[in-house]
Image (spheres, rainbow, N blue to C red):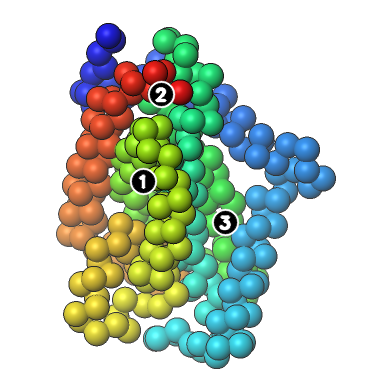
Amino acid sequence: MQKFSISPAVIVASLWANRNLLAGLIRREIVGRYKGSVFGILWSLFNPILMLAVYTFFFSVIFQVRWLGGGGSKTEFALILFSGLLVFNFFAECVNRAPSLIISNANYVKKIIFPLELLPVVAIGGAAFHLLVSFLVWMVFYFIFFGVPHLGVLLLPIILLPLAFLTLGLTWFLASLGVYLRDVSQIVGSIVPVLMFLSPVFYPLKSLPEEFQAVVHLSPITVAVEQARQVMYWNGAIDWVIWCEYSVASGVIAFLGFLWFQKTRKGFADVL
C-alpha cells in the first residue's frame, strides 16, 4: 500500500510543483459556484452587502445595540460588526465545506497522481476570494462615511495569516474524517453557528466578565477577530506577543491536520 510522507516539506513542494493546477482549481472553485446564475460572480459582491444591511438593521435598529467604546451611530456599528463577520465567514466557509470536500471530489481519489492534499488549499483559496470581496465592500463603505481608511488596514493580511494556517489544519482533518464518518457534516453544521456567538463577533471581548473572557478565548477565531477589528477600525497596532502565540498554535494545528490527512488518505479509495 502506498505510503504518504508527513513532512511539512511535502506540502510546500506539492504547492510549488502544482502551482498552475492549484491556480486553475481555485479559479474553477470561484467561477463554478456562480455558474448558471443571472448575475454570476457579482453575487459574491451582493452577499456581503446584504449581510451588512441585515445585521445592521436587526442589531442597531431593532435591538438598539451600541458598540462599547464606539460613537453610537448605526453606520459605525455596522462597520465594526462587519469587520468581525468577514473573519468569521472565512473560517466558517472552509470548515463547513471540509467534511464533504473529498466525498464531493471522489473522482480525484481514484487518480493516484492527483495531489489530494491540495483540495483543502483550494477551499481556502475560494474562501480567501470571498474574504477579499467582503473587505473591499467594507473599505468602500468606510470611505463613503468616514473618508480614507486608516493605514492599519494594511496589517490585515499579517493578522489573518495564522488564521489561514489554523483553518487549513482543521480543513485537512475534517476532510479526511468526513470520508469515514458521514455524520461529521451534521456535527460541524451545528457547531459553527454556535461558535459565531462564542466568538467576539457581535460584541467586544472587554464587555464580558473576566471569567467569560477566558472561555471566549478558547474559540479558534477570537484572536483574529479582535486584532482584525483593532487594525481595521480603531487603527490599533498588532499585539505581537499574542500574534506569535496564535501563530505557533496555528502552525501546530496545521501540522497535526496534515499529519492526520496523510495517515488516513490511503483508505479513501476503499471507502468511496
Image position of 61 with respect to 159: above or below: below
Question: Which dot marks residue 134?
Answer: 3
The residue drawn where x is 47% and y is 14% is 110
The residue drawn where x is 42% and y is 45% is 183
Q: Residues within 10 Å of mark 3 (few under 14, many from 20)?
A: many
Q: Label 1 is placed on what type of residue?
A: Thr
Image position of 19 with respect to 242: above or below: above
Residue that carries the numbered disc 2 in the rendered image = 271
Residue that carries the numbered disc 1 in the rendered image = 167
Measure the C-alpha gap from mark 2 to mark 1. 25 Å
Question: Which dot marks residue 260?
Answer: none
Please report contact status of discs 3 and 1: CB closer than 8 Å, yes or no: no
The residue drawn where x is 66% and y is 35% is 31
Of labels 2 and 1, earlier in sequence is 1
Measure the C-alpha gap from mark 3 to mark 1. 18 Å
Q: Can the viewer see residue 36?
A: yes
Q: Quadrant of residue 152?
A: bottom left
The location of residue 25, given as percent across then percent down, is 55, 27
At mark 3, the secondary structure is helix
The location of residue 61, given as percent across then percent down, is 61, 87
Image position of 122 with respect to 106: above or below: below
Between disc 2 and disc 1, the foreground one is 2
Image position of 120 with respect to 10: above or below: below
The location of residue 107, given as percent across then percent down, is 53, 19
Of labels 3 and 1, earlier in sequence is 3
- Quadrant in the picture for the C terminus: top left
Q: Label 2 is placed on what type of residue?
A: Val
